Amino acid sequence: MAILAIQILNSLLYASVLFLIAAGLSLIFGVMRLVNLAHGSLYAVGAYVTAWLVGRGIALGVPLGWLFLLLPLGALSVALIGIVIEPLLLRPFYRRAEEYQLLVTFGLLLILEDLLRLVWGGTPLSADTLMDALPILHIGGLFYPAYNLVVIAIGIVAAVILWAVIYHTKFGVLLRATSQDRRMASALGLNVGLVYVVAFGIGCFMAGLGGAIVVPTQAAVLGMGVDALVIAFVVVVIGGLGSLKGALVGAVVVSLVRTAGIQFFPELELAVLYVIAALVLLVRPTGLFGTT
Amino acid sequence: MTRETRQLPNRSLLKLVAGAAPILLVLILLPSLIGTYQVQLLIYGLIAAIAALGFNLLLGYTGLLSFGHSAYFGIGAYSVAFAVAHLGPHSMEFYLLLGIPIVAVTSALFGYICVRHTRIFFGILTLAISQVVYSLALSFYWVTGGSDGLRVPRPALLLGLLSFSGSHGFQFFIKSYYYYVLGIFVIGVVLMWVIVHSPFGKALQAIRDNEVRARFIGLRIRRFRWISFLVSGTFTGVAGILWVPLNGLTTPDVLYWTFSGEIVFTALLGGFRNFTGPIVGGIVFTYLKTYAVASTEYWQLLLGVVLVTLVLVLPTGIVGAISRARQRLARRSAVT
């Protein structure tokens, strides 16, 4: 029983990280119709920056409690990168065919992956001090780090905030208007360029936050972004590209399948996920909750 | 009218022969002028060109961007590796005869699924399927060797006429294999040229340019796309088959989705709106990557910057830019 509880908690932990990545990817696609292949790498940047900040913080003798404030800082740095990238690199491509958007973001992926290696080298960067700073819980005789519960909570809070922003604020209305009809929104006097920058920034922030909260549980390594991207694709394909609810449901489904897979069919774990994604695409190309 | 349409492919084939003859002559003479290492690089370039040529039938002529062509390249490579491990004759012809049906069948199967969608969904579907193949190759390590991959020794060429054991085998193998690959490359280019200029190829381009109109004139769009996918995957698979004896080893890396990205990169580098674009792209990309890897640890960074600049500045690729410059020159000289 205790094992089951821990497995469920583990899959929720994984789900909340996945949700953060996939929701960002989905938001960017929903608003800008852009499939950002570099999104996973932005997640990796979040992880690296946070781990580096935590390392600096420890070296400077910052008290443990304050170190937790570095998590949002890591996410913000990724948002900053996004705000720079969007107008400079991506804006010229909205008018051109989708192929070019994929290619430019693929180029961005190559650049970001190597920049990480250039700055932080090939050795994994860890921030497990944060995880050790919190107590270890006892669940039915088994040990479980309390930090993992923090991650789950952050995932839930992020989902609620994002939902509130999109559906209950004026900015959310602008966002949805732009996503539904960009030209009409522009004709009504909306500053579409600004909406795009902010949306891209939020999407990048989510990816960065995913990286920031995951790095205390597992070190930042090269290639984590590329791996995360394909899994995030599976999530948004199952849930539906451009749908917030879809990203949530997709993240939970994927992490449950993955946890069950590791337990029962470890060889086929990844293959099963991709097969599910392919099947969903075949039956419902727009995913479970997607529109258009 | 009928006579003219019947003549058209012949005339265009003649054009191909006339244009390609000097280049082919250079390619034939080149190995006696350059070192073994350069010849080896050139083989890699020709193989990349075959892969990109196949890929471009889908992107350039059918208007479908596949982000999963690593699957067909990798399946070609792995089918050779399996044949080495489990089946008898150690000959390249045998590998080709065995591998081509395998890649053709898998691309037919995967293509049948993928062509149900277009645009971004097609891209993601091809990506997902190639990732299935990748994760299977990684997981079933007792069959595929996992991340260590499978070794493939140098096979005999031309029905065992040429075999390459012993200490001087390597140089001899590279020279002979160069002409072998060049031969298949020429066959591939001619075949693709005929396909692209045939009524079938014209139908694909019609579908690419306007799907609704193509349907109105009675083209069975999905079937055309499917056959295009099949041919495209098989070409890329042949490239994989040819690649593995040269590389000596196949690992799941050639199945990973970033390798598909490299194939896309290759086609774009040369220019996917031109027939010769992917060929030029394949050779240029091979040199670019080799020298980038040799000169800096951060070759991905270099490639990424090249890719982004390319997409921004030269959207029609190398060949597209050259032909546009040539057109502009011709127009200017016509005016004066």
Image (tube, coloured by chain):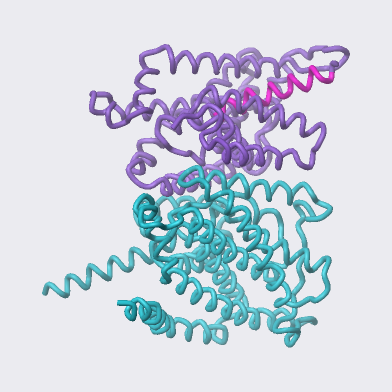
Chain colours: A purple, B cyan
Residue B67 percent across, percent down from the top left: 54, 50
Placement of A59 over or under B140, stated as above or below: above
Image: magenta residue range: A3-22
| Residue A81 visible in image | no
Pick the residue in front: A235 or B331.
A235
Say how many tags the image has: 0
Q: Is residue B42 left or right of residue A83?
A: right
Main SS of residues in magenta: helix
Residue A175 percent across, percent down from the top left: 38, 23
Pick the residue in front: B321 or A277.
A277
Pick the residue in front: B279 or B221.
B221
Residue B75 inside the magenta-drawn segment: no
| Residue A87 visible in image | yes
Placement of A72 over or under A235, stated as above or below: above
Residue A201 percent across, percent down from the top left: 44, 28
Residue A15 inside the magenta-drawn segment: yes
Placement of A159 over or under A230, stated as above or below: above
Tell me what residue is drawn at x 56 percent, y 46 percent.
A114
Residue B86 occupies quadrant: bottom right
As drawn, which residue projects farthest toward the right? A141
Please state, as top left, top right, bottom left or bottom right, where the C terminus of chain B lies in the image.
bottom left
Tell me what residue is drawn at x 44 percent, y 47 percent.
A104
Residue A86 occupies quadrant: top left
Residue A225 percent across, percent down from the top left: 60, 38
Please state, as top left, top right, bottom left or bottom right, where the N terminus of chain B lies in the image.
bottom left
Pick the residue in front: A224 or A156.
A156
